[in-house]
Amino acid sequence: MKNYGPPAFNAVRGEGVYLYDEAGTQYLDFGSGIAVTSVGHSHPKWVAAVQAQAATLTHCSNLYGIPQQQKLADRLVTKAGAGRVLFCNSGAEANEALIKLARLHGEKLCAEEGKRFTVVAANNAFHGRTFGGMGATPQEKIQGGFRPMLEGFKFGELNKIETFDQLVDETVAAVFIESIQGEGGLFPAEASFLQELRALCTERGALLMLDEVQCGIGRSGHFFAFDASGVKPDAIGMAKGLGAGFPIGAVWVAEPYAELFQPGSHGTTFGGSPLASTAANATLDIIEEEQLIENVAANSPAWHAELQKLAEKYPDQIAGIRGAGYMVGLALKPEGLNLTITTAAREKHLLVVPAGDNVVRLLPALIATPSQLSQSVEILDGVFANIEH
Ligand SMILES: *Cc1c(COP(=O)(O)O)cnc(C)c1O
């Protein structure tokens, strides 16, 4: 079907931060399959783990215990706090489970179904393409053609606590926010905003659910992007970088609320399979052994400074840079320039991803070195220099 538009090239091989087309052209991949290949393409340790597991047991369904899944759950609990984990296969599915959690929570509070189910999300959000995810994504390009939407969503303004203060009333079961908005144009939730939101949710009995599908698993320079704020959410959605290229999603839910899901409440055939769990465990192994979160935190400031200089060099094109760690957006000025830059960068063998609000996103693998980061800025410099003329 035509929903992706015509591709620029066929991708046939990947190695580290590089992607190769059929002709053998090497691209510096700062898209990472949209923030997915977190430890780089075909990391040898990841490949060995996945190959060995594929040869041992790929799938058995959740009718049986899966030791690799238990191990992965334990590791995520160590990162997120006392709670439980449910696995699935994608970001949209993780968020769907969170929206179902909100409904269970609201029903428990009101002891009556359909009384308290509203989820307050943010304008400019992106939570996926299912009816739950679309409902929480107030963008015409996502919702258009698919109405009626799932009911029960309201929208505040990110980083404007007063808008949430107004919306979170006795009909609201949860607040649902990306710690760093990705598709909508790289808007980080400020630490103070997350802290105020935490207090608001606690006071009014609404769950604080954070979508870490894109910004999580080390990308921000912290394991979770919200870690920088010190906030403890009630539930977290994860996917993209968790499997580093093997599809897996997960939700973590804090201890008292995790009990809302009981046998039969929710399920999945594929979620948390031995193969998917092994891929995610291998990803976390590599992140820990190679200290990749420390790598991101150490290398980001210099890279951001270089990008800031680029913005100052091309003030008519670049409005500014936003983001954290290896999740950065260049906000552009002339309308539609993000698509032009994405194409021009590709022609110079740098892959970047456009985002909403005229933004170009840079999402290198967490293994990217200072020299590879600098190379991305050099290539972009050449791209902007040509655009000016
Ligand atoms: C990509 C993304 C999703 C959807 O994930 P899929 O795996 O494409 O379903 C949800 N939320 C955020 C923040 C995302 O970036």
Image (tube, grey):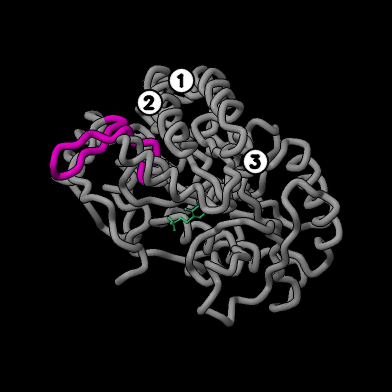
Q: CA–CA distance between discs 3 and 2?
A: 22 Å
Residue 177 magenta-highlighted: no
Q: Is mark 1 on a helix, strand or loop?
A: helix
Picture layout, residue 249 above or below residue 170: above
Q: Which of marks 1 and 2 is nearer the N terminus?
A: 1
Give the residues drawn in magenta, as a range.
16-33
Q: Which amino acid does label 3 sit on?
A: Pro
Please give the name of the residue rendered at 71% of the width and 69% of the height, measured from the top-left corner. 118
Residue type indicated by callout 2: Ile
Q: Which of marks 3 and 2 is nearer the N terminus?
A: 3
Judging by the rendered image, the residue that carries numbered circle 2 is 367
In whole angstroms, how far apart are the C-alphas of marks 3 and 1? 20 Å
Relative side of 58 to 163, left or right: left
Q: Which residue position is annotated with label 3?
A: 188
State the mark number for residue 295: 1
What is the total number of numbered labels drawn onto the structure image? 3
Structural distance between the alpha carbons of marks 1 and 2: 7 Å
Badge 3 element: strand
Query: Residue at left 26%, top 47%?
Result: 275
**Which SS class for mark 2?**
loop
Residue drawn at x 75%, y 54% as measured from the top left: 157
